[in-house]
Amino acid sequence: MRWGMVIDLKRCIGCYGCQLACKAEHGTPPGVYYARVLKQEEGHYPTVRQLSLPVLCNHCEDPPCVEACPTGASFKWEEDGIVDIDHDLCVGCRSCMMACPYTNRYFNDQRQHYFAQGMTPYEEARTGSHQHNVVMKCNFCRDRVRAGKLPACVANCPTIARTFGDLDDPLSEVSALIKERGGFTLHPELGTGPSVYYLPP
Amino acid sequence: MNLYSPRSDMPPIQEDAWVPSTCSLCYGTCSILAHRVDGVVVKIEGNPDSEVGKGRLCGKGVSGIMTHYDPNRLRYPMRRTNPKKGLNEDPGWKRISWDEALDEIGEVLRKLRADDPRKLVVQRTTTVTACRVPFHAFATAFGTPNFSVSGGGQHCGNGAHLISGMMHASWSVVPDFEYCNYSIFFGASKGHSAGHASCSNMGKAADARARGMKMVVVDPLCNFAAAKATEWVPLRVGTDAALALGMCNVMVNELGIYDGPYLQAKTNAPYLVGPDKLYVRHPESKTPLVWDTRTNGARPFNEVPAADMALEGEFTVGGISCHPAFQSLREHLRKFTPDWAEKISGVSAATVRRLAKEFATEARIGSTIVVDGVALPYRPVAAIAFRGAQGHKNSVYNFFSVTLLNHLVGAADVVGGCLGFNPTSHGYPETGMVRYLPNADPDGLMIVGSWMGYHYPYPPAQPRLPQNLGLQDLFTIGMTSPFLDSTDREEMWEKFDVPYRPEVMINCGANLVMSIANKDAVAASLSKYKFIVSFDLFLTETSNFVDIILPDCDYLQSLDARSNYPFIFSLPAGMGEWCWPIRQPVLPPEGDQRQFADVLLELADRVGFRADLNAAYNAWLDLRPPYRLVGDESYSYERICDAELKNNFGTERGLEWFKEHGLIKWKKKPEEVYWRPFVDARVPVYLEFLKPIGDKIAAIAEPRGLKIPLEYYEPLPDFLPCRSHCCDKPGFDFYGFYYRDVVHTNSFTMENPWLDETARLDPFSYAIAMNRSEGVKRGFADGQAVWVESETGRKVKGRLKLTEGIHPEGLGFAAMCGHWTDGQPVAKGKGVFYNDLLELDWEHTSPININLDLCVKVRVVPAESAS
Amino acid sequence: MGVRWDAVVDPAAVGRHQPRPPLPQPVIDRSSRRIRVCVRLFGALAALSAERSLRLELPAATTIAGALAALGERLGGTLLAQLLDERGQKRRHCRLFVGGYPVEDLRMPLHATDDPTEIDIILLIAPEGG
């Protein structure tokens, strides 16, 4: 079983629902977005299109971050393929951040909050539980998934652009979409083997 | 003891609860599930049970947590100690108790009501749909007709809602995403941004895209809908009518493609018009006549089978030469050649022809389809418009010309075509309540079945010497009015002998200093008020003019029994299910925060008009016995909500039932969604009734010194230029306009730090978009700070975003940013305050629907330093 | 042409929906008893009128229109002009309730009953937006 995600760029409209649902789910501190939406325009006037590209940790099959980690804090779950971080083992050296070609890791250096006046009750509940001086990133909402739910970004997407499922199952929806619609990954030439696929816009 | 506190029925704090309710970050009011753990809301998700959002939320919806927990929220009532009011005057806020606040407000209102209740202006923000009925009921009961929906209303709808109502019996229009094959969006982003049924529409639009629906987006800016368009058609700002009329001409006169039977059956196309441009009517009954081709004579329209009505020909009736309205339309359209359209809009003549051909061909006139076992006409094309096309002086003809495309091919409220949002409902099956259908006036033209107020789009009320401060009873085609705050309002009131002046305002959440037009104009207007009360979540720029501020509960702390009703407003259109969600408190008030609905009830009790308020609620909520409010009994808002729910859904389904279930649903029928063939009403393709209205208005206004340009009241549409189109000041070579952003709502959401952070990461949200070539030509760089100056000398500052995705003459500003209040420290200084470029007076207002002209001719110069 | 636009549509389909519950019929008194009516005015109307609640006695077979005319005679043309336009049609934002039920058709007849028939009149707000 290998969890994977398919993001349909034809459907995505760049509403930032995924970016913000993820933030709300995990209470990430200022500046940290496990899921982000990049925007790029293509073409020249008047033949122009705006592309919205949602990105997140690719949970690579051959993750450079795991290889780079000196303590074993960065690891890949054998049972489901999710690349995760054991924050008790992380010493905050940030080698993984340098290793990741997708810049999808973040360093949580200190207790931060959004308002000058201090932490809100929400941040106490969610942000406050994150450790400091460690690296943080998307883990495909592993707790939600193990409880039978979809990752927050997938569940929330209003255009239903994101699909989540088992890449090892040839009959799963994600496998079917990749095959039928020509799913592609980001920077395939790097050989990281991402588990996040995109369908053409 | 506070009778009005909702605490008594607040659910006990549970360890872990998901509470069904509704969002209020924009007026879309999508359904939510709020996750509360140990008294803290830790997540907001969509409610998969609900048709509104279908379990999903846009970026704003999931971010509501940070608006709620913002420490800058107002927590207790405050009174100014500094009597001077001004944009830069510190009010000297002093904390007071609710009793002190309501004592003073009650006294002011009591005196005012005894003097002249019309001196009260009641205002609300369009963002919070829940405040509509409570504030309308309050104004009704108090006895004032003076109601404002501030900038959100003024900018949004005098064109869009008027024409959507007149032609589709709904507040707005949307393609039938499920079946449409070819859609054209004129200045609209339905399904790609916020607003009416936004999250549901996002899913539907994505399905349509996946299915292969072609979407042509006509817009000066390539973003949102245009970003995903099959074809982006850039056009000069404010010239939508020109393109649409060019297309209509090609369809009717070059291609000869139009839906004759539809025009005969469902429009006033066959009605005979005489040399005076008015209907030829039966001498006794006054019924409009048509030419019966079978009997070869003129007869009342309601006595002739539609198929026998002539659409063309010259006839003589009672000695008068006349012809069907369609013939007038057809001849009138001839002058809108593709070359003409190109000259005005910038869209090439070839494109005009091609779009018209594609639209007319894909309309598949004459075809049918079966949906859920019901056979229906099938026209899989839709032309829609919204805020872009409507934000102009010429919005009536802009909007009308666009929807004329639909009506020429019969693609109106049938399968695949342009749909109103739920114009008909057969009612909740068990009770028959919540049922409404459009019907027809004596001329056979459609009257809406459901509307948001009582100023219907058709038939327009007869103009009279105005008694309303907004002059809407003179300019009866209009709806919201700029004259409450315009720089020439006093002049207008004197011209028309309006016998009173506004003295007191009660405001719910609107920030009109920013949202209507330039801040100085509105500030001057507000300074004249003797007393202003405002319900707010935060201090705003408008707070500088307020006397008493009341700390409002937000949507997570409030009750509302009708989050998505009327259905014409923000329930998804098209097939699916009817859905009636409610909003319920998830969290208690903080400090002294109170729900506005409770406060209004208490004020009515204190001032002594509770019986009137009860009667007003009965009328607005359509309460029948045994649920009608009686006498002057002091019903709580919970009781009123409970009454409404039981009134509509039966005795077992009151507030408690809805709190548990969150919503009620029942299946839609094809005859409800695709109602056009089943409702015996026609729509105008010839706006015959405008001329008499215009003449009446001129008869009242011109003797008093106000010239009415009657070209706006002609029965057939034209391209009438905005002021910006007529500006030829050298150096002023950009058309400034603002557009809605998906992460922001009016001036409300910039204080939310998640949304602000997201906006800062977005290339457009806080920037001024300029065409890259044009920018480079002028020596501008991406990110450069510039001053943008209007032809009247108003200036705003911002940073440029050079983009390929904007018309060379366009200058696009996202949302309504540029806050300067210290009360919203996150919002302060972010983005650009476009509205400061807008004038607010008769010259910049449409003389027919009193819509503000929102585009401005500007010049751009570098600013010295970054800021 | 000559083909119906909605040729495939079955008009009877509309009849199959659930009709709105009918307004209850009052007990019809076919005698020539005079009709007693209690008119209550709310909101702006109450502010315009010296009396906000008044009793009228009307001839048998009076309609709502007749009741309003009698009201106008009692309270003046200015008030009546708020309810009716120049053609005598009820203004849309003027809501009338007879015995608690909304009434749009002024031709509806009133009936003599034991208790006075209650007629509530209120003017609602016209403009809206957003």
Image (cartoon, coloured by chain):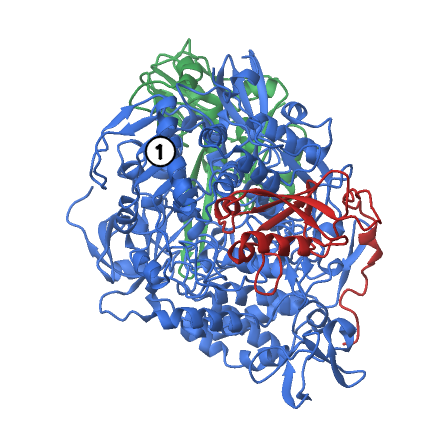
Q: Which chain is red?
A: C
Q: Is residue C70 visible?
A: yes
Q: Residue at x 61, y 68 (%)?
A: B684
What SS does tag 1 mark?
helix
Q: Is residue B426 left or right of residue B764?
A: right
Measured as percent of width and height from the top left, residue B481 is found at 42, 55
Image quadrant occupied by the C terminus of chain B = top left
Q: Could you say which quadrant of the image residue C41 lies in?
A: top right
Q: Residue at x 54, y 80 (%)?
A: B332
Q: Which chain is green?
A: A
Q: Residue at x 65, y 74 (%)?
A: B269
Residue labelled with disc 1: B751
Of the residues shown, which amino acid type is indicated by label 1?
A: Glu
Measured as percent of width and height from the top left, residue B661 is found at 66, 26
Q: Residue at x 65, y 49 (%)?
A: B422
Q: B605 and B665: which one is in front?
A: B605
Q: Is residue B246 left or right of residue A128?
A: right
The answer to whether residue C101 is above or below residue B371 is above
Q: Could you say which quadrant of the image residue C21 lies in?
A: top right
Look at the image and give the colour of chain B: blue
Measured as percent of width and height from the top left, residue B284 is found at 70, 77
How many labels, in total? 1
Q: Is residue B744 visible?
A: no
Q: Could you say which quadrant of the image residue B680 lies in?
A: bottom right
Measured as percent of width and height from the top left, residue B513 is found at 31, 45
Mark 1 Cα-neighbour bin, 10 Å: few <14, some 14–19, many ≥20: many
Q: B147 and B237: which one is in front?
A: B147
